[in-house]
Amino acid sequence: MENEERFRFKTTIGLALIIILVLAAVFAAVFFLTMWVNVPVGNAVVLVDPLGGKISEPILGPTWVTKAPWVRPVQITVAVDTLGMWGDGTDRTADFPTVKSFSRDQLEMEIDIMIRWRLDSGKVKQLYENLPQKNWKNDVIASIAREQIRIVTKDFNTIETIEQRDFVAQTMRDAIWNKLSTSTPLAGAVIDFEFELRNIGYPVRYTSAIEDKSIAEQQKIEAEFQRQIVVINATANAEKITIEATARANATVIEANATREAIELVLEAAGVDSSNETRVAELYLVVQTLRQIAPDIDMLIMAPDGTPILLPSPTS
């Protein structure tokens, strides 16, 4: 009996030692593994020591960090982060649904945006101290974006949001950035901010009204264009008539001057005295008129009573 009891005692002691050794090995392994923290690219880690009540300065990845087992590592993304707002809340590519806001003339619009930023690694410790829940993206940045968009849109009427879209987008961008950069909880940690106005959605009835107005304006432009063509053609015709009339008047003056000079030459050559000048001039004009009426006449004989007799050419 004593031998059996001794054997049982030794066996119990052996098992206890084995269990202790196993537990010690597991504890050592867990202790060792919890001392190492992997910090990936684009991340920073701050070490929170509950015993010492301290938070370390951020350590940038990629790297490994050693710590005490009771120290808690907090990973914070410092790479480019995004926040998208569009759709009705069911679109998985968006973080939040579209921002609904009103214009100055009280028309409801749906504003789709995308914003991008990075966190300044030198300020993530203070950012974490202000927001230990790490909710700066969903609760702070998103809230500021919605608020500033609604503030901006109320300063523009609906037509201005269409005609001045680039200016509206820039105004939204500046308003959001000014608020983010001065927000106390964010501690100035947001940098490299970018803003994209993806779309401004209008009610269907308003879109239809815009299309009708656009068609009416196009028709008005076309009518104005046609009117200008008519005016141009009328002006051109008037100028043409004026030019032709001027040319005819000039031709008449030239012809009259030539006739006067011809009569003077005839009178001078004939040696006609002043009492017969009028008669000779009349005969000259009659002859010129008859030549225009009957260009094929080769001979003209004056009867004793002064009546002209026309003799056509033999070939006519």
Image: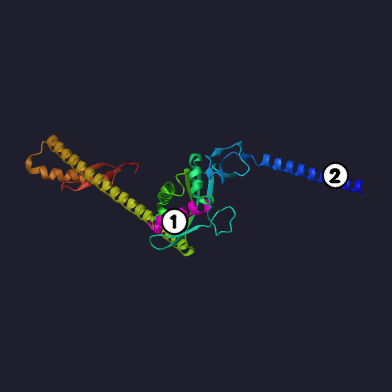
Q: Residue 65: percent from the left, percent from the top?
A: 61, 37
- Is 41 or 15 nearer to us in this picture? 15
What is the three-letter code of the residue carrying label 1?
Glu
Q: Using a 10 Å C-alpha cutoff, classify the residue at mark 1 as few (fewer than 14 neighbours), some (14 to 19) or many (20 or more).
A: some
Q: Residue 77: percent from the left, percent from the top?
A: 56, 44
- Is 260 or 305 nearer to us in this picture? 260
Helix, strand or loop at label 1? It is helix
Whether residue 310 is visible? no
In terms of sequence position, does the residue under pointer 1 or pointer 2 come before the other?
2
Residue stretch rendered in magenta on the structure = 137-159
Looking at the rendered image, the quarter that the C terminus falls into is top left
Q: Mark 1 sits on what residue?
A: 147
Q: Is residue 304 left or right of residue 138?
A: left
Query: Which numbered disc, 1 or 2, marks the residue closer to the eye?
Result: 2
Membership of 257 in magenta stretch: no
Q: Residue at x 43, y 54 (%)?
A: 148
- Is 211 or 131 nearer to us in this picture? 131
- Point out which mark residue 283 bears: none
Q: Residue 222: percent from the left, percent from the top?
A: 40, 55
Helix, strand or loop at label 2? It is helix
Majority secondary structure in the magenta region: helix
- Is 182 or 249 nearer to us in this picture? 182
- Point out which mark residue 10 bears: 2
